[in-house]
Image (cartoon, coloured by chain):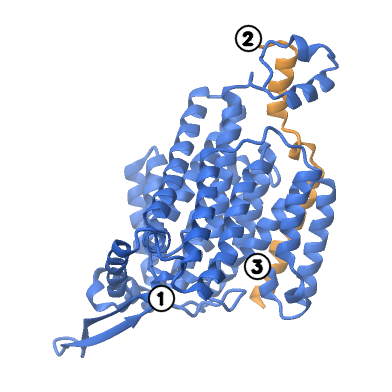
């Protein structure tokens, strides 16, 4: 039944795309985030929905869509470099089988992120892409949020659509993504046109934001709490009444505390007792191991290089309660511990060149969005207010992701690469308002046709490019 | 049960969004940018 429903949805969206090929791009965003082919057990598992959606998105853009001044930016060049570099490091990977499994989805993620800015060329396309991303991730988040409220949460036990603790369904990753989309939700309540900001839309956005905040509680992912703290700081930055906001936030935390499950409070407490927590202890050990590893492998060890690590350490084990506690030190040996940080993931797998390129990609994104935000504020054009606000939302989503990425290996996370693709498209779009006289021949011919001025191209004031 | 309800609801919203987007001309032609280009062609802008 689920299979038929999902296949029906997929088919209808494919039909929509016949009139507007950009909807196929949206369909790929949906497939790549939700992975409907993994949600069913019947016919949908044998249909290559991802391949069909990508072929439709790319083919539709190539053959049917209007191509408005395709621009290849520095950030796309960096992504292309990362793609080539990842392929290069994979050739000498220490674990070639596991490395090729990761390569299978990483290259698709990068190719799509490079391609996305070519397609997102109008205001409504930004909204459409962001809406599909938020609603699709929202499906996972709402379901998780409801289960959390009903008591189905717990570390590693909160069930999502797919019984697979990987990709966006991994507990820390979904916690990070959930918090990262909250700024986008806010944008929709002010600038949405597909679902104009009416009371029901605002209530839905509020409910979804609530579900987003519940995900870190339901998954008991400590990274999620750090991301919420980051979101709080960003809200303070925007707020005109900072003291009032801080007091309100504090009050909310105090009021919410009695409702939090004990297991959540216990797990969050381990953040301050890293010595007694295996996960936190091994994290630091893996990071040290990675730094040693790149001394011998400065160009990286290829995907999944962390599998080579192994270390033994002594960890304190406290038993008993109250005043009758005793601490013993036990030897713990860990092998193949994951990086638990996107920075060390890039360093270990792609070496210094890969880490440098990734950091540059992220830094340029933050800078570009800040520039767009400031330019739009300076213009003070009410028609372009949405643009500046979208730049803020995308920048904040990235900042929250970067904070989360400090503690989990999500350097290639597709959802975040899609956000990067949107950022690139937004920077290109905003630039067109700064230099409107640099219209291309195609654009000016199109404008000429609409204006019915046959000699306008030859006599126009701007130089043809 | 919860999963199925959420799946149906969100896919319903996605279909509604897709349908509304399909009907909108400005998905392919941006009125803001067209205005700039047209103004340029008409020679409204200073060189």
* Residue A79 visible in rendering: yes
Which residue is label 3 attached to? A35
Q: Quadrant of residue A300?
A: bottom left
Which residue is label 1 attached to? A307
- Vertical order, A123 against A235 (above or below): above
What chain does badge 2 belong to? B
Q: The residue tagged with tag 2: helix, strand or loop?
A: loop
Give residue B47's mark. 2
Neighbourhood count class around disc 3 (C-alpha, 10 Å): few under 14, some 14–19, many 20 upward? some
Q: Which chain is orange?
A: B
Question: Looking at the picture, how far across and down is residue A276, in whole percent?
Answer: 24, 78
What chain does badge 1 belong to? A
Please name whichever residue, A329 or A391, is drawn nearer the observer in this view of the structure.
A329
Taking the spot 61% from the left edge, 75% from the top edge, the residue there is A162
In this image, B18 relative to A15: left or right?
left
- Vertical order, A293 against A266 (above or below): above
Q: Are marks 3 and 2 in contact (CB under 8 Å)?
A: no
Q: The residue tagged with tag 1: helix, strand or loop?
A: helix
Neighbourhood count class around disc 1 (C-alpha, 10 Å): few under 14, some 14–19, many 20 upward? some
Taking the spot 52% from the left edge, 23% from the top edge, the residue there is A379
Query: Between tags 1 and 3, which lies in front?
Result: 1
The span from disc 3 to disc 2 (Cα, nearest Å) is 51 Å
Q: Quadrant of the N terminus of chain A?
A: bottom right
Q: The residue tagged with tag 3: helix, strand or loop?
A: loop
Taking the spot 45% from the left edge, 65% from the top edge, the residue there is A302
Q: Earlier in the sequence, mark 1 or mark 3?
A: 3
Query: So how many labels did they put on this image?
Result: 3
The span from disc 1 to disc 2 (Cα, nearest Å) is 61 Å
The span from disc 1 to disc 3 (Cα, nearest Å) is 27 Å
Question: Looking at the picture, how far across and down is residue A34, in whole percent?
Answer: 64, 65
Q: Which chain is blue?
A: A
């Amino acid at each position: 039944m689920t299979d038929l429903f999902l296949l029906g949805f997929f088919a209808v969206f494919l039909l929509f795309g016949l009139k507007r090929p950009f909807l196929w791009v949206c369909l790929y965003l949906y497939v790549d985030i939700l992975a409907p082919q993994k949600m069913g057990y019947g016919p949908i598992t044998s249909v290559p929905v991802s391949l069909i959606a990508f072929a439709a998105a790319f083919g539709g853009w190539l053959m049917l869509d209007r191509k408005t001044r395709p621009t290849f930016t520095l950030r796309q060049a960096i992504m292309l470099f990362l793609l080539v570099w990842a392929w290069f490091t994979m050739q000498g990977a220490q674990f070639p089988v596991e490395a090729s499994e990761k390569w299978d989805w990483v290259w698709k993620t990068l190719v799509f992120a490079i391609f996305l800015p070519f397609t997102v060329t109008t205001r409504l396309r930004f909204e459409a892409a962001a809406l599909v991303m938020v609603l699709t991730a929202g499906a996972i988040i709402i379901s998780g949020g409801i289960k959390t409220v009903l008591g189905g949460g717990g570390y590693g036990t909160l069930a999502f659509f797919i019984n697979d603790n990987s990709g966006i369904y991994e507990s820390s990753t979904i916690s990070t993504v959930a918090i990262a989309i909250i700024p986008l939700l806010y944008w929709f309540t002010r600038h949405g046109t597909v679902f104009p900001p009416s009371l029901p839309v605002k209530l839905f956005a509020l409910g979804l934001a609530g579900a987003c905040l519940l995900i870190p509680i339901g998954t008991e992912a400590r990274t999620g709490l750090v991301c919420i703290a980051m979101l709080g700081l960003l809200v303070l930055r925007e707020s005109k009444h900072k003291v009032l906001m801080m007091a309100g936030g504090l009050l909310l935390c105090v009021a919410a505390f009695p409702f939090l499950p004990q297991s959540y409070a216990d797990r969050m407490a381990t953040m301050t007792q890293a010595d007694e927590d295996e996960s936190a202890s091994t994290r630091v050990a893996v990071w040290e191991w990675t730094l040693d590893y790149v001394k011998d492998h400065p160009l990286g060890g290829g995907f999944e290089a962390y599998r080579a690590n192994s270390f033994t350490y002594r960890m304190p084990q406290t038993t008993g309660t109250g005043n009758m506690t005793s601490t013993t030190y036990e030897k713990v040996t860990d092998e193949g511990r994951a990086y638990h940080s996107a920075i060390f993931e890039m360093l270990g797998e792609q070496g210094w060149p890969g880490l440098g390129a990734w950091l540059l990609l992220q830094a340029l994104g933050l800078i570009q969005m800040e520039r767009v935000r400031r330019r739009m504020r300076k213009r003070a054009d009410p028609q372009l207010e949405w643009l500046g606000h979208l730049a803020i939302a995308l920048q904040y989503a990235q900042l929250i992701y970067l904070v989360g990425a400090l503690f989990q290996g999500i350097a290639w996370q597709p959802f975040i690469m899609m956000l990067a693709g949107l950022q690139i498209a937004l920077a290109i779009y905003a630039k067109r308002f700064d230099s409107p006289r640099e219209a291309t021949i195609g654009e000016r011919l199109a404008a000429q046709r609409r204006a019915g001025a046959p000699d306008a191209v030859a006599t126009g004031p701007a130089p043809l490019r | 049960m919860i999963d199925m309800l959420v799946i149906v609801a969100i896919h319903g919203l996605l279909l509604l969004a897709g349908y509304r987007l399909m009907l909108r001309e400005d998905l392919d032609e941006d009125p803001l940018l067209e205005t700039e280009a047209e103004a340029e062609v008409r020679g409204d802008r200073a060189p």
